[in-house]
């Protein structure tokens, strides 16, 4: 079976990481090619990592659909003799559906979001993959039929996180100006209200009172509209000296091994691949009790689930973990076990291939 994957996302994000892991794991189950945004992380990384995979960089914009790129996509799909077009997200699905209308090739679409206004486009896909049951629920609320939605959890390549040496971890701490032996708590993503970074730093002020040597990381790009609010919390709380903003990084496997507790206090989160990456490093995760995070974190076993915006509860749970090394280690180990049981890239690829077969048969 020949499958053309379409992804318009520019940077390193959930959909682009999803596609990279999928291509790496698909094996002989399907012959895949990629149409990705020109100049974006995914196109460059796939050409570097998988030279045998046909990769077509196109001017696929995320907001307004580019008609020239759409026609090029349709031509690629027709000339390549593809049996399926597998689109990522609502923007990629718009491109794929137009190409499908021009070529007759069916579309399998993956939904990565909880935003209701992004869901109607998926109604026209032959089949829809939801990255979490939470996403499936929103799709059904927007009128999609349950039997046309397949839940396939994201998965990662666990082994990518096992090759980091103690020397690499020590160097990473030195680069971040974090002393040896002090606890590190990290949160993730581009700064914004949705990711709950304000809740994280309000909790950090409280954690600092109980654990003064604790350091706090935000691994993600700072934005002009929200970062100033975070810096105000940091400055007023007197924790400037123990906060680090490393920015948007591509060496996450190395950096995650420097942390003791991971925090994802998002106000909305369809899944949260970074939680899987933390679990791969045996780091307990404290997360919001919302969206796909509820499906990842096993409450009291691999971490804790808390109400969004509850900075007091967050501070209490983090301090509890920092003061109890045994519980912290046990949760980290159980998180790794849960990851290997439920969230590997191989499992994701196998489930995706099953959807391909249901829609495209044997490619005839």
Image (tube, rainbow, N blue to C red):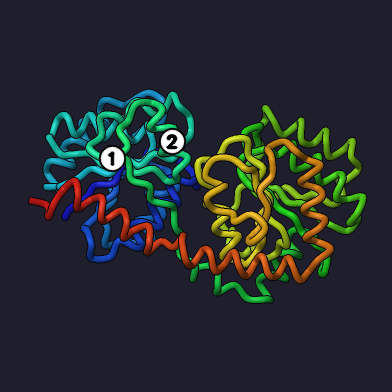
Q: Where is residue 130 in the image (x, y as percent from the top left)?
A: 39, 43
Above or below, comparing residue 229 to residue 171 in the picture: above
What whole-number distance in Å separates the C-alpha atoms at marks 1 and 2? 12 Å
Q: Which residue is drawn at 28% across and 65% down?
A: 27
What residue sits right under mark 2 in the picture?
137
Q: What element carries label 2?
A: helix
Q: Which residue is drawn at 57% across and 67% down?
A: 336
In the rendered view, does 186 fall on the left or right side of 85? right
Above or below, comparing residue 10 to residue 155 in the picture: above
How busy is the neighbourhood of tag 2: few (under 14 within 10 Å), some, or many (20 plus)?
A: some
In the rendered view, does 239 fall on the left or right side of 63? right
Q: Position of residue 180 (x, y in %)?
A: 81, 69
How busy is the neighbourhood of tag 1: few (under 14 within 10 Å), some, or many (20 plus)?
A: few
Q: Are marks 1 and 2 in contact (CB under 8 Å)?
A: no
Disc number for residue 147: 1
Q: Nearer the viewer, residue 305 or 191?
A: 305
Q: In which quarter of the image is residue 301?
A: bottom right
Q: Which residue is drawn at 30% across and 33% down?
A: 145
In the rendered view, does 123 fall on the left or right side of 218? left
Q: Quadrant of the N terminus?
A: bottom left
Q: Nearer the viewer, residue 152 or 177?
A: 152
Report the number of numbered marks: 2
Q: Quadrant of residue 229?
A: top right
């Amino acid at each position: 079976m020949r499958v053309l994957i379409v992804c318009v996302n520019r940077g390193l994000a959930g959909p682009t990481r999803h596609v990279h892991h999928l291509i790496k794991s698909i094996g002989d189950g399907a012959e895949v090619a990629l149409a990705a945004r020109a100049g974006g992380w995914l196109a460059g990384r796939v050409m570097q990592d998988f030279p045998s995979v046909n990769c077509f960089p196109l001017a696929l914009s995320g907001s307004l659909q580019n008609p020239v790129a759409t026609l090029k996509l349709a031509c690629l799909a027709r000339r390549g003799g593809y049996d399926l077009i597998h689109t990522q997200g609502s923007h990629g699905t718009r491109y794929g559906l137009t190409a499908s209308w021009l070529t007759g090739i069916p579309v399998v679409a993956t939904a990565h979001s909880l935003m209701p206004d992004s869901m109607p486009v998926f109604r026209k896909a032959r089949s829809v993959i939801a990255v979490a049951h939470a996403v499936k629920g929103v799709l059904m609320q927007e009128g999609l039929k349950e039997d046309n939605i397949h839940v396939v959890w994201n998965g990662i390549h666990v082994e990518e996180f096992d090759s980091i040496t103690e020397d690499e971890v020590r160097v990473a701490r030195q680069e971040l100006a974090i002393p040896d032996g002090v606890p590190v708590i990290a949160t993730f993503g581009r700064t914004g209200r949705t990711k709950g970074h304000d809740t994280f730093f309000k909790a950090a002020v409280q954690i600092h009172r109980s654990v003064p040597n604790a350091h706090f990381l935000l691994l993600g790009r700072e934005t002009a509209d929200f970062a100033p609010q975070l810096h105000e919390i940091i400055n007023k709380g007197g924790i400037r000296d123990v906060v680090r903003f490393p920015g948007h990084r591509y060496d996450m496997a190395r950096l995650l091994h420097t942390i003791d507790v991971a925090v994802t206090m998002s106000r909305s989160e369809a899944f949260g691949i970074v939680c899987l990456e933390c679990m791969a490093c045996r780091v307990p995760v404290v997360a919001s009790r919302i969206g796909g995070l509820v499906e990842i974190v096993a409450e009291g076993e691999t971490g804790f689930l808390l109400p969004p915006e509850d900075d007091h509860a967050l501070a209490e749970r983090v301090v509890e973990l920092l003061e109890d090394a045994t519980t912290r280690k046990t949760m980290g180990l159980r998180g790794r076990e849960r990851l290997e049981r439920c969230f590997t890239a191989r499992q994701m690829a196998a489930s995706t291939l099953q959807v391909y077969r249901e829609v495209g048969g044997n490619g005839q």
